[in-house]
Image (cartoon, helix red, strand yellow):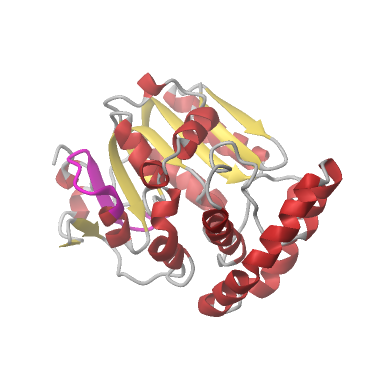
Amino acid sequence: MSIQIEDLIKDELKNAYVIENGIFKFIPNTSYSEGNFSKLRDLYGEHQQDSKNGTTHRFETILKRTNWPTSKFKDKLILECGCGAGPDTEILLSLGAKVVSVDLTRLEVTKMNLGQNKNSLLVQASIDNLPFKKDLFDIVFCHRVIQHTPDPEKVLDHIMSFVKFKGDIFIHSYGYSFLQFFRWKYFLRPITKRLPSEALYFIIQKSSTFLFAITTLMIRLGKIGKAINYFFIPFENYSQNKHLKSKPKKWLIQYGTMVTFDYLSPTYDKPLSPSVMKKLSLKHLDNKGVKYEIIKNKDLTLLRSI
């Protein structure tokens, strides 16, 4: 393995982990996400991977959102905060990076999806209490994760401390906007996040074929129909996505089920505001010589180095 855990962690934590199946575990296997995100990993991990679904969806999404050339990742030591089933990890590794991927639980699924790779190191830990030395990583990368933590501002404050001097950072959050907060998911979440994950998944799965048909019909109606889908119909339809629209109907329904469950099941969903990103960037990044920008629209907010 080209990445050695002993070179990364604080001296006082040298004996604070166990190794199971090649995964370095600093916390037990259970967590608040065990019921929802782990289910997504088990059922749909391969749906998210470009190598398994035959698209370049993740690859192009990462390059578009970071706005970085592929050469930016080559030979860089990346701290990936919240890797899930490993779809982004796969892309980062393919770009020639050395990736330390952290998540709370179920990294066995991640390891199975990624296979053996000397440039990958999987660490089971909480991203609000990482075991690593400060100012260590070339890139701190947190995509689709931070809003699902109990205190996103605290997490961002913490993970920024691991960026090295003149390093790079990429943070993604759901949009902090009026339109985003009036989507169907935020009206339903006060109920759905309290449901047992199996019950919620059953409801979404059983209604998915019908909702796929309804949302497809709305898409055909043009802008008005798309607006109805965005605000009122609780299902994510990817039949018009340029990367996925060629997939069979059954696959698209499964993918939409996965994303809808991902929206409705997490215990936490707290998008970060651009003002918080700016405040913490002034605290951490300006002192490290990191040039950055904050991008915001109705669906997402990005903090990225330039």
Q: Measuring from the top left, give residue 28's x and y in whole percent.
A: 30, 69
Q: Give the residue drawn at x 61%, y 60%.
A: 260
Left or right of 281? Residue 97 is left
Give the position of the N terminus as an image quadrant. top left
Q: Measuring from the top left, give residue 57's x and y in whole percent.
A: 49, 38
The tally of labels here is 0
Closer to us: 183 or 31:
183
Query: Is 100 inside the magenta-drawn segment?
Result: no
Residue 298 appears in the picture as rendered: yes
Q: Measuring from the top left, give residue 84's x and y in whole percent.
A: 40, 54
Closer to us: 53 or 133:
53
Query: Is 114 inside the magenta-drawn segment?
Result: yes
Residue 136 appears in the picture as rendered: no
Q: Give the residue drawn at x 53%, y 55%.
A: 255
Closer to us: 7 or 260:
260
Q: Give the residue drawn at x 49%, y 43%.
A: 143
Left or right of 129? Residue 292 is right
The magenta stretch spans which residues?
113-129
Question: Is residue 132 shown above or below 290?
Answer: below
Q: Quadrant of residue 69?
A: top left
Q: Measuring from the top left, give residue 62's x and y in whole percent.
A: 48, 34
Left or right of 11? Residue 90 is right
